[in-house]
Image (tube, grey):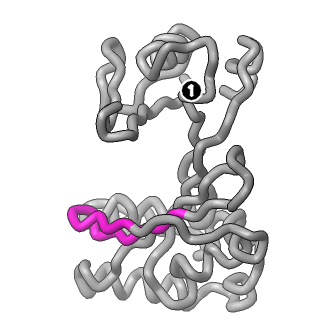
């Protein structure tokens, strides 16, 4: 996608990068954000997503307007069944303790070992977020392109059409033909989800 916009003469600005974790003392937001804090990032926002049982924070690098914001969310384990909590705690207990202190944690992928399909399916029924983290572990959940930084597009609708015309498909939440947009311009934030066919 970066090359696609660059080929149009655009300078691609990454608005933010997002990571997921659990609110467990070994791997909560404070643990994941440490390498960013050590490099100058500062907390800039707190969020509660009650329906999804998530707490989240975003961090910014002062004085660097084009530095991507870092968004980290954590699943509130106490809001789930004893079974889910036990599965997650068992998975965390299997991990080599050195990884929790490593700057490489956010890039380490699945640190929990070979996943069980049956456990994944049961987790997914209760929490898609927990199932995703159980399978994928520590990696970026998503990257974003700042539409406001693109000069040759009038807005998110133009970007959607351009991406669709170049082989990208909408995430299943949306309509492939009309372009699914979450949020609204008057709420300051709009987003759309794509994946490459």
User: Where the C terminus falls, by quadrant?
Assistant: top right
- Horizontal arrangement in the rendering, residue 46 relative to residue 98 (left or right): left
Q: Is residue 149 visible?
A: yes
Q: Is residue 189 above or below residue 78?
A: above
Q: Between 87 and 9, which is closer to the camera in this rendering? A: 9
Q: Is residue 83 above or below residue 109?
A: below
- Horizontal arrangement in the rendering, residue 139 relative to residue 57 (left or right): right
Helix, strand or loop at label 1? It is: strand
Residue farthest to the top? 165
Q: Position of residue 11 (x, y in %)?
A: 74, 26
| Residue segment shown in magenta | 47-58
Numbered marks: total: 1
Q: Residue 56: say if magenta.
A: yes
Q: Is residue 164 visible?
A: no
The residue at 66%/50% (across/down) is: 68
- Horizontal arrangement in the rendering, residue 166 relative to residue 12 (left or right): left
Quarter holding residue 89: bottom left
Q: Residue 95: say if magenta.
A: no
The residue at 33%/12% (across/down) is: 177
Q: Between 167 and 91, which is closer to the camera in this rendering? A: 167
Q: Is residue 145 above or below residue 68?
A: above
Q: Between 173 and 188, which is closer to the camera in this rendering? A: 188
Residue farthest to the front? 63
Q: Position of residue 176 (x, y in %)?
A: 35, 18
Q: Position of residue 37 (x, y in %)?
A: 69, 74
Quarter holding residue 8: top right
The residue at 75%/20% (across/down) is: 6
SS assignment for the magenta stretch, majority: strand
Mark 1: few/some/many CA within 10 Å (<14, 14-19, 20+) = few
Q: Position of residue 118 (x, y in %)?
A: 37, 66
Instruction: Say which residue label 1 marks.
Output: 196
């Amino acid at each position: 996608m970066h090359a696609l916009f660059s080929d149009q003469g655009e300078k691609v600005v990454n608005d933010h990068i997002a990571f997921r974790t659990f609110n467990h003392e070994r791997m909560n937001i404070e643990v994941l954000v440490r390498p960013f804090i050590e490099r100058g990032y500062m907390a800039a926002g707190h969020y509660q997503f009650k329906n999804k049982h998530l707490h989240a924070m975003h961090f910014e690098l002062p004085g660097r307007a084009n530095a991507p914001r870092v968004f980290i969310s954590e699943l509130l384990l106490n809001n789930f069944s004893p079974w889910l909590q036990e599965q997650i705690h068992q998975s965390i207990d299997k991990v080599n303790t050195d990884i929790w202190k490593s700057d490489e944690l956010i890039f380490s992928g699945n640190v929990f070992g070979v996943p069980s399909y049956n456990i994944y399916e049961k987790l997914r029924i209760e929490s898609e977020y927990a199932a995703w983290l159980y399978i994928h572990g520590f990696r970026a959940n998503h990257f974003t392109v700042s539409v406001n930084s693109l000069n040759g597009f009038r807005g998110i609708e133009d970007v959607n059409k351009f991406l669709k015309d170049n082989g990208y498909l909408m995430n299943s939440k949306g309509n492939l033909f009309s372009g699914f947009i979450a949020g609204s311009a008057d709420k300051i934030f709009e987003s759309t989800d794509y994946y490459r066919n």
